[in-house]
Image (tube, rainbow, N blue to C red):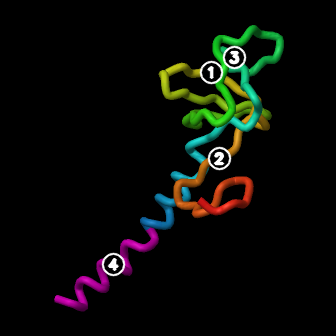
Amino acid sequence: AWATFVLAVLASLPLLVVSRRSLAGRVLVVRAPEAAVRSEPRLELEAIASAPAGAEARRLDELGGWTRIELDDGTRGWVKSDALFPLDPFRSERPDGGAK
């Protein structure tokens, strides 16, 4: 029984690594003082919403320097990618290098 348990754990390790990688970067945090959320990835369009610094968003898509996100209130739109940074749920440090 012990050997079966050890084999099962070892067999599941690749799955855990893949799921960790798929989660990393899926949650984003707004870096800019305020990020304009637009209906399309074009600067000339008016913002449909804004996201304050520190707000969390879920990554939906990416396209040429833009990231499509969904905010906690359900708003979906495009934000300039450089206004965001990925939040790795497995990371033990803050993005600024400090400890949690």
Quarter of the picture holding the C terminus: bottom right
Q: Nearer the viewer, mark 4 or mark 2?
A: 2
Q: Name which of mark 4 and mark 3 comes first in the sequence.
A: 4
In this rendering, would 3 be left or right of 34? left
Disc ID at residue 4 = none
Residue under the point 60% across and 30% down: 69
The single residue placed furthest to the right in the displayed view is: 44
Amino acid on which disc 1 is placed? Gly
Residue under the point 55% across and 28% down: 70
Amino acid on which disc 3 is placed? Arg
Q: Name which of mark 4 and mark 2 comes first in the sequence.
A: 4
**41 to 99, vertically: above or below:** above
User: Which of the 4 image quarters holds residue 67?
Assistant: top right
In this rendering, would 74 be left or right of 53? left
**Magenta region: which residues?**
1-14
Q: Name which of mark 1 and mark 4 comes first in the sequence.
A: 4
Disc ID at residue 77 = 1
Asked if the residue at tag 2 contacts the one at tag 3, i.e. Cβ–Cβ closer than 8 Å, the answer is: no
